[in-house]
Image (tube, helix red, strand yellow):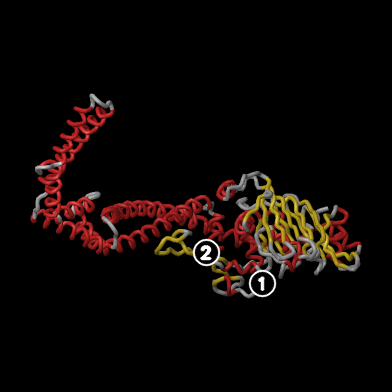
Amino acid sequence: MLSKLVIENYALIDHLEMDFSAGFSVITGETGAGKSILLGALSLILGNRGDASVLMDTSRKCIVEGTFTIHGYHLEELFRVHELDYDDMVILRREILQNGKSRAFINDTPVNLAFMKDLGDHLVNIHSQFSVITLNDADFQLAVLDNYSDNLQVIQNYRDEFSRYVKLKKEVEDLVKRENLAHKEKDYHQFLWDELEAAKLREDEQETAEKRLDVLSHAEEIKTGLVHSLGILSLDERNILDQLSGIANVANSLSRFHDSLREISERLRSNQIDLRDIASGIEKIEQDVDFDPVEIQNLTARLDLIYHLEKKHGVRDIHGLLALRGELSSRLLEATSMEERIASMKVETGKIHESLLKDAEKMSKNRRKVIPELEDKIRQTLVKLGMEDARIKIELSRLEELTPDGLDEVAFLFSANKGIGLSEISRIASGGELSRLMLSIKSLISQKNLLPTIIFDEIDMGVSGEIAGKVGEILKKMGESMQVIAITHLPQIAGKGQLHYWVFKSTENGTARTQLKKLDQKERVLEIAKMLSNEKISDSAIKTAKELMGK
């Protein structure tokens, strides 16, 4: 419930701070004193939009802050979803800056306006003379039925599951589209993969083949050069190895005369060994190199295939072809896995659908079960409010497809007068009849203890006298299970309040200001007497005021 309200720099309010209590409270005041301004300020912390036009003093920001006690209203999950710490007391604050921008806070944590509105919808319901238009709204009518039938937990679970169902169905649809596209490309991708797989490509194969083909293509030139080199080294009559051997022998024989020649002789012997190894290597290479037209043909064909595949797929080397083969393999595997995933998701979707159907049937059963009682209690309340001939009928029809509300569509049919057939509520002309019907409905909902606070803004429109007193009794009764605040101009309703607040306008330094005062018992008597007798308060008015207050 709303326990404290602080308003600064809003419209005609410079600074206002007021505590509120449980039960039934009334707010009275002269027309134009600023009762609607209070609701406008309160609506800011309930998530409504605001701009710089609300600033009384444009040099400073507007602040509206409300303190609420929320224990027992099952809002823990809402806080968890929005990653906020839950506490039984919550402070909602809204700031409107001089540039028109606004900031919203919950327990001093910045939040977006959507969350503030979501939380506000769970804390306060403001019922104005214009809100009766919601009576003809199918969503509101179904919400009334669900509130009264204790369907809220079932429908909350259903909606969570329905949201998951819709999301999963969308995922399946998207996956099926991807699968269809993949199937269209699958044959082509399979052909490309088969072609690359058949090629039996190997890492570094291209470089090796190119080098081998280069050797074979120049085999005659290579053999001729190697044979010539081998002759110079070891085969000719005056080959290098024989001459080195002779030089080494001379150096060795002369080394007894000069020590350095022994070292030279050893180095020449070492060079002989190296040159013999070189000659042996040249001879081996020369023997291995043979012109082989079959191998040349095979290598040429192999490289032509590789070059063709590289050009076809726009890659630079065999590594690109191998990477492409892996990518095609992944796509083909994905196409196959998508089929399995779709099948699995369809099974899961089917199970959720079955569960939703069961919950929808349960919700429908609960709704149908309470319709007779709800119709009867609304009618009884309307009779108390002076509508003896009023009739209401709640029709529930079945839908073909599941919706976020189940399988039901509801329609409230109403007739205020005898001899007039039942019809949609929107066709009712009388605002007073609409107000009394809405009050009847909300009074029944309040008994379920579903909402902490409800504020009625001139719910007494179109009623007076004894009926006004009945309205006051209903509001007082509602106050036993929730916080009820009524802005009223009728003394019969004001007299039923447990607490009484008076809105008045004062002038300071030539500027009109709206102020709010909590009245004590004596002040209450005078205010209600004033409402009864206009400006001049008579003794009979005071007596009647005390009677209305039960004094």
| Whole-percent x, y for residue 358 in the image | 41, 52
Instruction: Examine the rendered structure and indicate whether residue 127 appears above or below residue 79.
Output: below
Give the residue displayed 15% in from the left and 58% down from the top: 300
Disc 2 packing (10 Å; few <14; some 14–19; many ≥20): some
Marks 2 and 1 sit apart, C-alpha to C-alpha, by: 21 Å
Q: Give residue 178's quadrant in the image.
A: bottom left
Q: Is residue 438 left or right of residue 141?
A: right
> In this orientation, which residue lies closer to the viewer: 10 or 542?
10
Is residue 446 among what the camera can see? no
Q: Give residue 390's quadrant in the image.
A: bottom right
Reading the image, the residue beneath label 1 is: 431
Label 1 sits on a secondary structure element that is: helix
Give the amino acid type for the residue marked by disc 2 in the picture: Ile
Give the amino acid type for the residue marked by disc 1 in the picture: Gly
| Whole-percent x, y for residue 143 in the image | 55, 59
Q: Give residue 185's quadrant in the image.
A: bottom left
Instruction: Examine the rendered structure and indicate whether residue 261 appears above or below residue 406.
Output: above
Q: Which mark is residue 500?
A: none
Disc 2, disc 1: CB below 8 Å? no
Q: Is residue 151 left or right of residue 179?
A: right
Disc 1 packing (10 Å; few <14; some 14–19; many ≥20): some
Label 2 sits on a secondary structure element that is: strand
Reading the image, the residue beneath label 2 is: 394
| Whole-percent x, y for residue 7 in the image | 77, 57
Is residue 47 among what the camera can see? yes
Nearer to us: label 2 or label 1: 1
> In this orientation, which residue lies closer to the viewer: 454 or 476?
454
2 or 1: tag closer to the N-terminus: 2
| Whole-percent x, y for residue 334 in the image | 30, 54
From this viewpoint, which residue is outermost toward the top?
256
From this viewpoint, which residue is outermost toward the front?
257
